Image: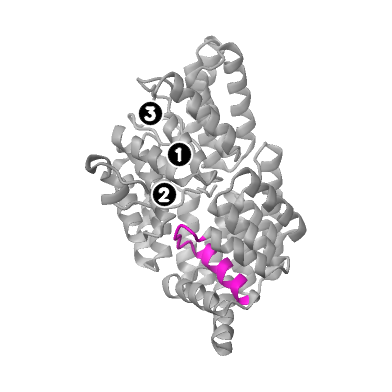
Amino acid sequence: MHRLPSTARFALVTLATAFVVTLGVLALSGGSQPDPAGGPQAGGPFSRSSSEVAFGDGARDATTTDGRIKKLSVAVRSRPDDTAAAAALAGAYLQRARETADPKNYLQANDVLERALARKPGDPAALSTRGALRLARHDFAGALDDARSVLASRGSVRPYGVLVDALAELGRYDEAADAVQTMLDRKPNIESYARAAYIRELRGDLPGAAEAMRLAVAAGGAVPENEAYVASLLGDIEFTRGRLAAAKTAYRDSLRRFAGFSRGEAGLARVEAARGRPARAIERLRRLVKRLPAAPALVELGELELAVGQSAPARRHLALANEQNRLELEAGVKPDAIFIVQEIDHGDRRRALRVAREAWDGAPSVRSADALGWALTRAGRPAEGLRWARRALRLGSRDPNFLFHAGMAAHAAGAGADARRWLGRLLRETPHFSALRAPQARRALAASRARS
């Protein structure tokens, strides 16, 4: 990271912020407060993901997302030239996509933005929101173009969220860090803290990540779901650090801020499983996916069921995850690293390898490197997979999945020292990262030690 003036290092250095903002999950705040410098609230993400963080900073909207959509739809019909209202409506559709896991909202947002930009090409409000939509669909190059177009014309702080996320997912981390710093200099808030967190997590500073994410939670936002999201991110950080009590507290806080929040529910299930109570975890996840069948929760449930020998329900839930992914593809979402890893582990490995190569070509990030390395390893080419795993870890990330994939690739390739280093670190720091994968990691580590 570039050295910055002392006044500019507030969050990136002093606070040592960090957490991966997954792109498939983070989309756009549904707020409608205008930006004095031009454009409604807009932003992007992860990863992921996609890996997908935009948060409002105005007064909290007391209505639901559906209520905002209804009000804004009336406004757009009555004032078709009001691109600010159109952009806010598209943003509300993206917010609903986050809340419901229904990718049809992307198509509705796209329709609104196409009409707005046909009336006013180059409108900064519509371009900012289209950038967020492109992020949600994993079109990172397109999102970068939109953000830069708005910044060149108006200099608004709003497009910096899209800019950061696009640069990061394109593997341009120094540029992303500089853009985060600009956000922090102009407006240290929930949005900028969360994005600064992403950059720091990639460098493996999890204690700093937790401190920064607490600042993001404390900053608050215009939409309750956004606050719940950053609270759940704090829970994820604490879980990765092996601090289960702190993780549970954060996940509960996310549910307090937004009742039924899916990431909070999934996080509590993860803690239950880590504490040796898989039946409780499965029960919680089954309630969640019945209400909100998002692919990540379905995969988590399916893998937990596999871990305890419940293969029939596991197959059903993993099939539903594949169906959810298919719906996202139909809504214009490009496959990202999360999608690819799911395909590798529970789908067509040959297809996964092809898609992983395409994802790397379009978005050469560490997440894409991890997915491609794992695809090669599972395809029986662990030496090649190991080379990509090293790329994934080159910034110092302590993501449990990165460490697991790298350690298993090294073990299969006969690189015992690397296998012991990565799997040993994984099992020291996050010993219960996965009920299904942790036993595999322990067996591989024991075998590698026996060989040495």
Contact (Cβ within 8 Å) of mark 2 with mark 1: yes
> Label 1's element?
helix
Residue for point 25% across, 41% down? 5
Residue for point 64% across, 70% down? 306
- Quick check: is 318 in the magenta stretch? no
The amino acid beneath tag 2 is: Ile
Residue on which disc 2 sits: 199
> Label 2's element?
helix
**Is residue 2 in sight in this rendering?**
yes
- How many residues crowd mark 1 within 10 Å: few (<14), some (14–19), many (20+)? many
- The span from disc 2 to disc 1 (Cα, nearest Å) is 9 Å
x%, y% of residue 153? 45, 19
Image disc number at residue 164: 1
Residue on which disc 3 sits: 157
x%, y% of residue 366? 54, 54
- How many residues crowd mark 2 within 10 Å: few (<14), some (14–19), many (20+)? many
Q: Is residue 121 left or right of residue 29?
A: right
| Viewer-closest of 59 and 145 | 145
Image disc number at residue 59: none
Quadrant in the picture for the C terminus: bottom right
x%, y% of residue 439? 57, 77
Residue range in magenta is 393-411
Residue for point 52% across, 67% down? 403
In the rendered image, the vertical position of residue 84 relative to residue 97, given as above or below: above
First in sequence: mark 1 vs mark 3: 3
The amino acid beneath tag 1 is: Val
User: Secondary structure of the magenta portion, mostly?
Assistant: helix
In the rendered image, the vertical position of residue 181 relative to residue 260, given as above or below: above
First in sequence: mark 3 vs mark 2: 3
The amino acid beneath tag 3 is: Val
| Viewer-closest of 156 and 324 | 156
